[in-house]
Image: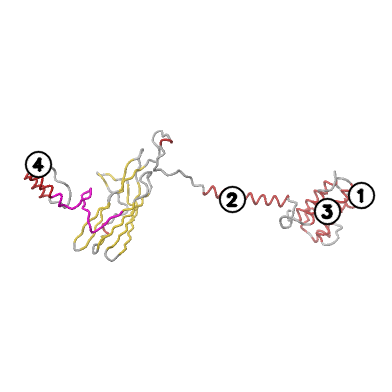
Amino acid sequence: MKKLFSNAKTPNAPGIPFLTFGLARRLGGLTGFIVMLVALASAPAFAEDGIAVDPRVSVKTIEPQRDVGYSVGDILERTIILEAKKPYVLLETSLPIAGNDKKRRGKGSGVEVRDVKLETTRGIDTTTYTLHLSYQVFTNNIVAKPANLPAEFVKFGGEGKNFQIRIPSWSFRISPLAVYGSVVVERDMSGFRGPLTLDATRHHQLLWVALGILAASLLGLLYVLGTSSWLPRMGGPFARAYRDLKKLPTTPEGLSHGVSRLHQAFNVTAGNSVFDRTAFLSRKPGFAPVGHEIDQFFGLSRTVFFEPTAPHGIDGDAMAWLRKFCRRCRDCERGLK
């Protein structure tokens, strides 16, 4: 037992008198062992790094939700709540400094303090300090490696003396940017990893734009080709005449009825009886693109009703030409030049 105490090293724990351990080594044997136990029992409680837990300040930490899957450039948010009994106050000069990267064995940890924010709430008997710390990862590796948000030490003052409180460290894992070696996906489905999702917002926007363009195109096509009066200016005299012409047979009697039906459409559109192109276009200039066809129509009307041998300038099937001409008049009626 004497040899055991003679080789013992002095503990590196502030607040425990070194004289007590020295006396235990000198006494040796059972007496020295009892002296050391008494000293340990009477000493205050110590944290793992040798800083005593002070009853004047309570410490509570709110850590990030996950401790894996971080890579270089990621930011970790941490909240520390310090509740100090009065009259003790936090010395803001002891707070962590933004841009600080604590070194270990002469090398940086790769985790740097990015931002520090302090909120103070004063109560009747206590003062609550809420410390928001942001850390950024500045290191990478070919494989996942352990890291930690370093332990911080803040100081309090009051009653003529200062003391410091330890904010414990928090461990996490830093993942590589690229996978090293071959990985079987089925064996890499960690429960700590969230679902891999893709942002489809832009694709959804483009889809809605495309659907809008398609709807407008279909509406325009319906307006151009439609024969019903679903939309404004679709149920004009020439549109109704065109529906009637499609039902007439390709015979002399059908041609006669078709010419009469088209005459009726001209009269309704102009508001009076129409017998030539000039009078009609003076009232309805929107039909100017079919001016030549109007002359041919009146020539065809003269041939059908008055002079069978009169020239009209229409080649081929007169009934087919009449339907096509009526359709062009319908387009002019709708403003489709």
The amino acid beneath tag 4 is: Ser
Which mark identifies residue 6?
A: 4
- Quick one: label 2 or label 3, which is nearer the N terminus? 2
The residue sitting at 27% across, 44% down in the picture is 107
Over which residues does the magenta segment extend?
39-60
The amino acid beneath tag 1 is: Ala
Q: Nearer the viewer, mark 4 or mark 1?
A: 4
Residue 170 image offset from top left, x and y in percent: 31, 48
Residue 245 image offset from top left, x and y in percent: 82, 50
**Farthest left residue?**
27
- Quick one: label 4 or label 3, which is nearer the N terminus? 4
Q: Secondary structure at mark 4?
A: helix
What residue does disc 3 label? 294
Which mark identifies residue 310?
A: 1
Q: Nearer the viewer, mark 2 or mark 3?
A: 2
Residue 226 image offset from top left, x and y in percent: 73, 51
Q: Give me the C-alpha separation between circle 3 and circle 1.
A: 16 Å
Q: Give me the C-alpha separation between circle 2 and circle 1.
A: 56 Å
